Image (spheres, rainbow, N blue to C red):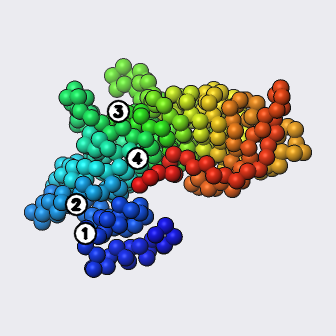
Amino acid sequence: MDFLPLELLSEIANQKVLSNKDLTSFARVNHRFHDAACTRLYRSGELSYVGVTNKDIVKVNSYEKNGKFVRIIKLNLFSLPTSTISIPTAIFPFLTAFINLHRIHITDSASLDWSSFLHVLAIIITTHPYLKILEVQRTLISADGRSDISQPLSLIESHKSNKGTFAKLDVFILRLSKKDHPGLISRAALNNLISILLPSTRSARAFTYSSDSHESSDIDLKDPVTKRDYEAAAWEWDNLEELTLKLVPRLLPTGGADVIGTPNPNWSYYLSIQRDLRNVKRLAIKTGIDELLAQGSGIFIGGLDVMPQLTSLRISNTGRYLDWDTKHNPKHPFFTLAQRLPNLKYIEQTDSYYLTRAIQSLKVFRGEGHSVDFGYVVSDRPWISYDWEY
């Protein structure tokens, strides 16, 4: 089944001769067929209607019969203007029907208000103790981070006080985009996300962060009364091993003071990813080699020295052209990388979109003293994020 196109798998899944039991059995064997089977068995597009009518209540009851076998689900959240029921209220019976979920992919293109979106996330991590992979994709708007989020926060705090079990993630994927002006990811919104998800995300061994805009620093973190800046929160990790960053290149603005309101030399730092990187062993990043090597760069405050355990590095060729032949260039940037990172073993060039497909791989050979050499090898080292047993 691994070699069959998804369209054919979908056709197989939709054959009337296959019962729900057959679909469930197939889905437990092959994760690609699981996606196709779930599309037939559990239509995520009906999510916004759950709980609105008696017909939908019957639908949820049918989910409960086979829901315990479902391990993967993809949710595309949306809200109808005519709906009188909140999405968190509607989604609760739907999600609790799938108690054994291992992976959830949730997408929202700013259809839900910010508080409702966070409430859905809070429901997910407080009701699914076996959840291991969470992928969150949200299009942000300027209002995100500026609304009352007491309801989702109350759910998190009450779950803690009642000694409830949170999901303990192995893999956390966060994809953010900005819909309107100004083109900066709101720090207040990131603070909200971190405060809701941290009980589940801090256990993750792999983190993927994708953003089409820079994070703002303090423009939206001012106390409305004292006018003082709140502290910008950061993701905290107990033992993060793998970090994948798909970020826009750092551009020093000519009108930075106009954009932010006050001059701030650190405005383009990705402040949410600066903590607890000491155990990272594998880094995949979409950036130019010059910026990666720059001490105190716009990506890592302190440069690569904050990841002393780094053994594998994946980069894509953004910025200037980089010749990967190190034989005739003793000043090649890779020598600098190998000297700065004493545990580095592999440097890989990947595709610039997913950062997963290795185009070419170099192994670092260390000789006596500080001598370093490189040799081409075949990449066969799967990473946590992309080698998951479904």
**Which amino acid, by three-letter code, is at mark 4?**
Ile
Residue nearest the viewer, comparing 299 with 183: 299
Measured along the vertical axis of the image, is residue 351 above or below residue 286?
below
Mark nearest the camera among 4 and 1 is 1
Looking at the rendering, in which quadrant would you find the C terminus?
bottom left
Numbered mark located on residue 199 in the image: 3
State the CA–CA distance, disc 4 to disc 2.
21 Å
Determine which quarter of the picture holds residue 346: top right
Question: Which quarter of the figure has residue 228?
Answer: top left
Q: Nearer the viewer, mark 3 or mark 2?
A: 2
User: Residue 17: percent from the left, percent from the top?
Assistant: 27, 80
Q: Residue 20, labelled with which disc?
A: 1
Residue at horizontal 29%, vertical 70%?
22
Q: Which residue is mark 4?
A: 133
Q: Nearer the viewer, mark 4 or mark 3?
A: 4
Amino acid type of the residue that numbered disc 2 sits on in the rendered structure: Asn
How far apart are labels 4 and 1 at the CA level?
25 Å
